[in-house]
Image (cartoon, helix red, strand yellow):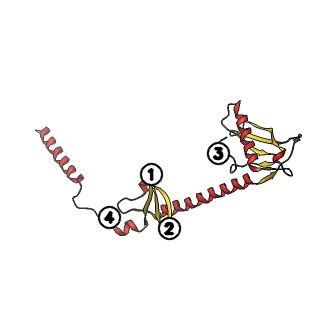
Amino acid sequence: MGLTVKRFACSLFADERRNEKEPSLKPQTPKKNMTTKNRIQVTIKKSTAKAHLIVADDRECWVQKRWLRQDDMTVSAKTFDRQATAKVEREALVKEIRDNTRAFRDGRHAVKIERETEKAIACKAYFEDGYCTIDGERLAWFPKSQVRDGAVPGWLIIAKAQELGERLIGGQNHFSITVVEIGGVEINENVRPARW
């Protein structure tokens, strides 16, 4: 008899818990003042699998899909400002790098001549690998037809740096060797080719 009473009591208790977990049938309406206080109404300009390009107040930025509230098409004002500012800063940085690269490539740069022959000049080229285990120097040769008043065109310096980098990688087990200077002209990461 005691066992059946315990089972009956347990089943009653379980029924009460089930009733508590059932959702109420009343439709829940979001509080308007709470959802729009710190959120911005946006429109979607473009979409990918993971993100939306959204536009609001003549500014646009990419946000993750989960950041956009689909029911009222709003996003957090703080998130929107942060992402829009970051997009403008990235675009300015990319433009600056392109301008620097173009100026270096189109300009002429005075080099320190180490050796000279009838048809070419040689300058020291310093290189290093990504792990700082190899530092060294080689001679980079430039044809005299391209040299004017001891200055070499930037496009030729970049091409020689790329050629030297590929030649140095050839016989060794290194992933990247970077030519950092040729003839006293520094080749920084803004003017290096993307792949060496």
Please name the residue that numbered disc 3 is placed on: 194
Instruction: Depth check: give the residue in front, 14 or 120.
Output: 120
Mark 4 to mark 1: distance in Å? 28 Å
Mark closer to the observer (4, 1): 1
- Residue 48 tag number: 1
Question: Could you tell me the amino acid type at mark 4?
Answer: Pro
Question: Could you tell me the amino acid type at mark 3?
Answer: Ala
Residue 47: where, in percent of width, then height?
Answer: 44, 54
Mark 2 and mark 3 in contact? Answer it, CB < 8 Å.
no
Mark 4 and mark 1 in contact? Answer it, CB < 8 Å.
no
Please name the residue that numbered disc 4 is placed on: 30
Mark closer to the observer (4, 3): 3
Instruction: Depth check: give the residue in front, 83 or 157.
Output: 157
Neighbourhood count class around disc 3 (C-alpha, 10 Å): few under 14, some 14–19, many 20 upward: few
Mark 2 to mark 3: distance in Å? 33 Å
Mark 2 to mark 1: distance in Å? 21 Å
Residue 16: where, in percent of width, then height?
Answer: 19, 51
- Residue 173 tag number: none
Per the image, label 1 sits on a secondary structure element best described as loop
Above or below for 13 versus 170:
below
Per the image, label 2 sits on a secondary structure element best described as loop
Q: Residue at x 69, y 49 (%)?
A: 189
Mark 1 to mark 3: distance in Å? 26 Å
Question: Could you tell me the amino acid type at mark 1?
Answer: Thr
Above or below for 40 versus 150:
below
The part of the image, by quadrant, that contains residue 64 is: bottom left
